Amino acid sequence: MEIENPLSEYTLLYVENEKEIRTYITPFLAPRVKTLWVAKNRKMALRIFEKYQPDIVLVDADMPKTDGVALAKIIRSENSEIPIVIMASYSNRHTLVDVVESRIDAVVPKPLKGVQLLRTLEDVARNDFSRRARSKVHATLAQHYLAIEEEGLIIYLDAKGIIRQINEAMILLLNYPIDILLGEPFEDLLDRDDGFNRYLSLFKAIEQRRSWHGEIEIMAQNDMKMTFKATMIPIRDIESPNLQFMLLLEDITELVNYRMLLKSELDETQKTLEEKLHFLKQYQNAINEGTAICRFDEEGTILKTDSRFDVMFGFNRNELSRRSFYELCGERGPILKSKIDCAHEGDNLLKFRIRCMDGAGREHISDSVFIPIYRKNGRIEEIISMHNDITELVSLNEEIKNTQKELLYILGEVAESRSEEMGYHVKRVAEYSRILGRLASLSEEDVEMLGIVAPMHDVGKIAIPDAILLKHGNLTEEEREIMNKHALIGGELFGKSEHPFMKAARIVAMEHHENYDGTGYPLGKRGTDIHIFGRIVAIADVFDALSMDRVYKKKWPLDEVIAFMKEQRGKKFDPYLIDIFLENLDLFLQVREKQKDIF
């Protein structure tokens, strides 16, 4: 993906010990990069490099007091991927040979020309940007997955606002053949009865390539006007140079129509104008807070229900008239009545989740709002209750959670499918973690969560080359550095999602190689700064890795495994947790024996 100035988002370390050259180059580079650090010798350069980890290093090879090529080699040994640019004279053949052998990314010939130096740095930044982007393809897939998980109605637009794809649920709702819509401007779908200016901010957001949130009205094929809450998110697909937008929609047509109906009924009331004005504000508050309506008096006797309420609770029309609303609420009825009795004028809203039995004896769960309507003398005239039936939503939420669990489990298996024995490994680690979490007095909710996300601990290995992941024998130092990156990659895979499962999976992926004494990786956390999920999975992971055969080693005898884990108490492992583990070792051995043949 091209960007106007690749350097504008990069930090740069410039190393030059000649003041005259620094004075010439520094003002030229400073406005063109995000941050510029300037060092005049090797010691200063290495100190800046270690502290700030710049994105690009620019070093003069011909410095009389500092060997620029040698400095580049040191930096390259610390970071094998950082782009390094050398400024060197072509007349110095010995230096140029060293440059080639040192895996330098680019050489700028001396004497320096500002335009050529800038072009070289931009090319290096662009290449590095592309390399980083390719490594994050999985992040794009995660964005699509999370968005689809949240919303069920989706339209994809390109950077010009042209419809490129519509998901099946949206097609069914609009009742259009998909080939009629694809390739057409999205603005053609929008209803313009109230003018087009209300959509200007939407198309301005497309032009500026940013997100947008608001309400839109779309005409379905049957000329029915449909109202949606819309959230538009720019999606940058690393595999394609083109930007697209994902429009996530929530159908609120029925709610909008019902609000209009209530307002119409208010106009027909026989109350005096003064009473109308007094009630109007309270009715408007009620309209904005719910869907199905039930009106009852101060004692709970039902005065009137709308058809939605009757359908929601499975009663025929007028069947609820004169019955007690509080009796419908079962054991929570007296609590609700007490709250309403204690309300005073000005306490306009009481929010309550109720569970009612319908006419067939089925339980319904409703998020409800109760609005006392007062006479001018301060006494309650009636109570309007607005109900949103969330029975299916609660059930669906459980189904979504189960689907999330299954997807996480599948993702763990995909990551481990490149090695059969590792596929078995994640299942055992999950069970060990669940047992240890329960022994450590975690809540049942956390124990369940831990058992689900523990298989994610090595998900970052999907980015590790087979030559390293499946290597028979010990890894070289360079291979070990690459392998160790799997923890950071695994954490990045789950991005910054606030979903509980995703947050927990990110923690396990990033922290299961952190050591209690602070010597672990990737962040060097120590003690209880390491999340307890990470500390638990660390024990489960090491126990299974040592006590089972791997492609690169044979399993250790049990007494040696136990000796090692005792020796690592307070070093690699949380002392409290390792003590619990060792005290209950038989439980973990039972799992190992039971599952080594099954998995």
Image (cartoon, rainbow, N blue to C red):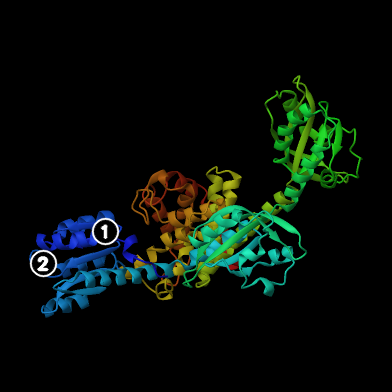
Task: Look at discs 2 and 1 and give the one toward the viewer.
Answer: 1
Q: Amino acid at mark 2?
A: Met
Pick out the residue farthest to the top.
377
Q: Identify which residue, 541 or 158, lies in the foreground.
A: 158
The image position of residue 366, as x and y in percent, is 74, 42
Q: Is residue 50 left or right of residue 475?
A: left
Tell me which label, 2 or 1, sits earlier in the chain: 1
Q: To which residue does mark 2 refer?
A: 63
Contact (Cβ within 8 Å) of mark 2 with mark 1:
no
- Which numbered tag is attached to residue 31? 1
Figure quadrant of residue 82: bottom left
Q: Identify which residue, 572 or 412, lies in the foreground.
A: 412
Taking the image as drawn, is residue 589 in sight?
Answer: no
Relative to 298, say whether 264 is above or below.
below
Q: Is residue 60 left or right of residue 432?
A: left
Residue at 48% x, 49% y is 582
Q: Amino acid at mark 1?
A: Pro
* Mark 1: secondary structure: helix
Q: Is residue 540 left or right of residue 52?
A: right
Give the alpha-carbon distance from disc 2 to disc 1, as whole Å: 25 Å
The image position of residue 471, as x and y in percent, is 40, 74
* Mark 2: secondary structure: loop
